[in-house]
Image (cartoon, rainbow, N blue to C red):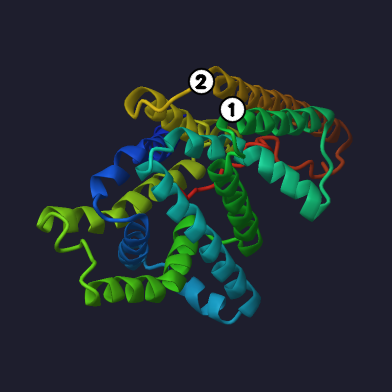
Amino acid sequence: MEGKDEQRAGMLYGMGAYGMWGLVPLFWPLLKPSGAAEILAHRMVWSLAVVGAALFVLKRWAWIGELVRRPRKLALITAAAAVITVNWGLYIWAVNSGHVVEASLGYFINPLVTIAMGVLLLGERLRPAQWIAVATGCAAVLVLAIGYGRPPWISLVLAFSFATYGLAKKKVDMGGLESLAAETAVLFLPALGFLLWLGARGETTFTSGGGAGHGLLLASTGLVTAIPLIAFGAAAIRVPLSTLGLLQYLAPVFQFGLGVAYFHEEMPPERWAGFALVWLALMLLTWDALRTARRGRAEALRLAAAAAVTGATVPPTGSADTIAPATARSPADK
């Protein structure tokens, strides 16, 4: 019973995390007249304050000394921080400029980009269904480019920047809270310097954009960044990675729904066709991943039964709970 309660709690945490990431397009417009660059700088500064407080409460500081003593790891954190800066900044700009649907597409195609990068950069081999899914995704981008009259550059930059961020995070191999603290620490001084520069020029909206209420909204960007991450961390230790891999689609689904139903962005037929191809590719990836995971579990059970009969040691078969294409990571990202 306790295990079921933990899994139920994990599902709720996961749905809460991805739900908050999916609904965040409702928050960024509240920060106008602040521009995307100022909002991004506040997000960096206040996120460090929030995660620093969380680390203080949890007394999790040992990782700092290890990180400082490992220059390669520190360089990867710096690279991750630079890439997520592009991702965060473009996402905020896209939402506040009326491109919520195109931004949601970036996170829909992110698993396809992640797979392509795995092949090109890590030499990974794809199963036939994965090749078909990637090809379908490429066709979708072509259809959308025709529909938009230009390549869907917002979607592509968001997808590639987040996939690159995920690759760097994989190499760093740190916990979500710790890695976010390290990344925001790297970004803190440049962000604070930018905000002070805006203030010196009289262009800051922190105090002049709408009074104390506007300043509090800008400060709350730290909570908007950290709370979903904490919920994600709570989910990750309670439910299989395959479950998180499926839940991750909640975020772009919510973003797409908001773009169409709330922000009333245009969706001509060719745009619907492009999105339909993307969704088809994702369904194919999910089906293939679930089938592979099921086969992995069956093989593990077979080996365990054979070992029980012969007394042999069961060789490791890898995690049967992992859905490779639906990489479930914390998009400290959106």
Please indicate whether residue 2 sits to the left or right of residue 96 in the image: right
Could you say where residue 323 lies in the image, as x and y percent from the top left?
66, 35
| Residue at numbered disc 1 | 147
From the top left corner, tell me how far across and down residue 205 is, in percent: 21, 61
Residue toward you, 80 or 298 = 80
Q: Quadrant of residue 277?
A: top right
- The quadrant of the rendering that contains the N terminus is top left
In the rendered view, would you say 209 is above or below 279? below
Residue 212 spot, x, y in % from top left: 11, 58
Q: In percent of the image, x 55 and y 40: which residue is there? A: 106
Residue hosting label 2: 268
Q: Residue furthest left?
A: 211
Snapshot quadrant of residue 192: bottom left
Mark 1 Cα within 10 Å, few/some/many (few <14, many 20+)? some
State the residue in front, 75 or 37.
37
Describe residue 192's horizontal placement relative to residue 219 as left or right: right
Rendered location of residue 138, percent (x, y) = 72, 34
Q: Please identify the residue farthest to the top as the structure is shown.
A: 269
Q: Does the CB distance between marks 2 and 1 fall below 8 Å?
A: yes
